């Protein structure tokens, strides 16, 4: 079927919008995406062979408040 996803859709519950948005911003800074980073964490967490703990990106630059 044309509109059917190749992978099953997995839901994550209990994540507020602010956390979801902040996570999206962080994975973008790491040149990644939410799915890739969540998979990477889960593989590390369950001790899959060769899995490495994901690295956190640099903190965002604070806004310039001199104006």
Image: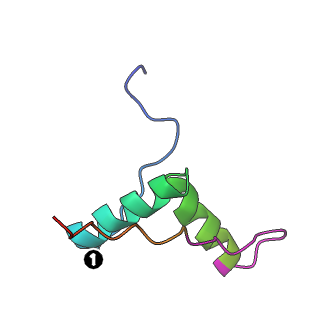
Q: Check disc 1: other Cα within 10 Å, few if <14, some if 14-19, many if 20+.
A: few
Residues shaded magenta? 45-56
Q: 29 and 35: which one is in front?
A: 29
Question: Disc 1 designates what residue?
Answer: 14
Q: 14 and 23: which one is in front?
A: 23
Main structural element of the magenta stretch: helix, strand or loop?
loop
Q: Quadrant of residue 49?
A: bottom right
* Residue 45, horizontal then vertical, whole percent: 65, 80
* Residue 31, horizontal then vertical, whole percent: 55, 50
**Residue visible at 46% across and 53% down in the picture:** 28
Q: Hey, which residue is sitting farthest left in the picture?
A: 67
Q: Hey, which residue is sitting farthest top in the picture?
A: 2
Residue 29's place in the image compared with 4, above or below, is below
Q: Is residue 23 left or right of residue 55?
A: left
Q: Is residue 32 magenta?
A: no
Quadrant location of the N terminus?
top left
Q: Is residue 49 magenta?
A: yes
* Residue 30, horizontal then vertical, whole percent: 55, 57
| Numbered disc total | 1
Q: Hey, which residue is sitting farthest right in the picture?
A: 50
**Residue visible at 37% across and 25% down in the picture:** 3
**Residue visible at 26% across and 66% down in the picture:** 64
* Residue 61, horizontal then vertical, whole percent: 39, 67
Q: Is residue 33 left or right of residue 64?
A: right
Q: Disc 1 on helix, strand or loop?
A: loop
């Amino acid at each position: 079927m044309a509109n059917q996803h190749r992978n099953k859709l997995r839901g994550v519950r209990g994540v507020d919008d602010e956390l979801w948005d902040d996570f999206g911003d962080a994975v973008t800074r790491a040149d990644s995406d939410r799915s890739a980073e969540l998979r990477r964490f889960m593989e590390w967490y369950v001790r899959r062979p060769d899995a490495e703990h994901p690295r956190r990106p640099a903190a965002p630059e604070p806004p310039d408040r001199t104006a």
